[in-house]
Image: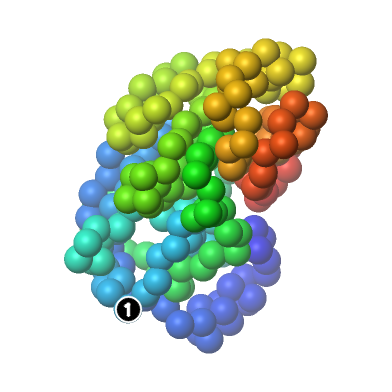
Amino acid sequence: MPSAPKWVFDTLNLFVSQIPEVQVSQTEYLSTTVKRISLQGDYEKLQFSVGAFFDIRVSDTDARRYTIAEINSEKNSLQLIAHIHGNGCGSDFMNHLEVGDRLVLNKPRTEQKYYDKAAEKIVFFGDETSLALACSFLPVMEEQKKEHLFLFELDAENNAIPELLGLENSIVFPKSTLFSDPDQIKELPIFKNEYWSDAYFVLTGNVNSVQNFRKVIRTQMHAAVKHQGYWLQGKKGL
């Protein structure tokens, strides 16, 4: 529900169970366009599967979806990672959050089963909007000793962010025409390496990039693919 009349959101907030006393405890700009936000609260009784998210009300009539990047072992602090692109109410809302601000959150949800525990090798693809999901994958993959590879298409100022987030085994590609062109995607080293031919691919981020990457995988490999486009140029709230 990216947008709805104000009365709909007001009604939902009355009838959906909420997490009390959630407060911004720390903010950090990893770049001018990527912000990490820590939220202090009581999350002890909640379940957080890989890819769990909050639909956060960012205006009277709009909500935006934010994946939970990490939650601490005491379950009293979690982190979100927001892309501050400056082109929408969600970006503006997250950009203006400061320490001490309070949020109204409903319980986390999981609609997509991104993680396949049966997969032995996992390849994750995304952009700035995918960083939180990648972070949620990492500890589970490490605990289960999964071979994994992160592929990101990022703006130049964000090239170092996967390393800052501890996302080892990452390859960063520039945001250019590469993932808009299936012929260029075919030339990526991963399609020349038989080792990853039976991996489980998770494709997220830009809708066009996801669709093109998926198309090439289907013609070049016999790999399982989970895909979810997060945004499309000119499409509000996707």
Q: Is residue 5 left or right of residue 107?
A: right
- 122 or 155, which lies in front? 122
Give the farthest residue toward the left.
Answer: 74
220, above or below 117, in the image? above
Q: Quadrant of the N terminus?
A: bottom right
Q: Is residue 155 left or right of residue 220?
A: left
What colour scheme does the image use?
rainbow
How many neighbours does mark 1 have within 10 angstroms: few (below 14), some (14-19), or many (20 or more)?
A: few
Residue 125 at x, y percent in the picture: 56, 34
Q: Can I make out residue 95 in this image?
A: no
Give the farthest residue toward the bottom.
Answer: 15
Residue at the spot x=65%, y=47% of the render?
Answer: 226
Residue at the spot x=48%, y=60% of the render?
Answer: 53
- Amino acid type of the residue tagged 1 in the rendering: Lys
Element class at badge 1: loop
- 169 or 178, which lies in front? 169
How many labels, in total?
1
Q: Quadrant of residue 45?
A: bottom left
Instruction: Identify residue for label 1.
Output: 45
55, above or below 170, in the image? below
Q: Quadrant of residue 9?
A: bottom right
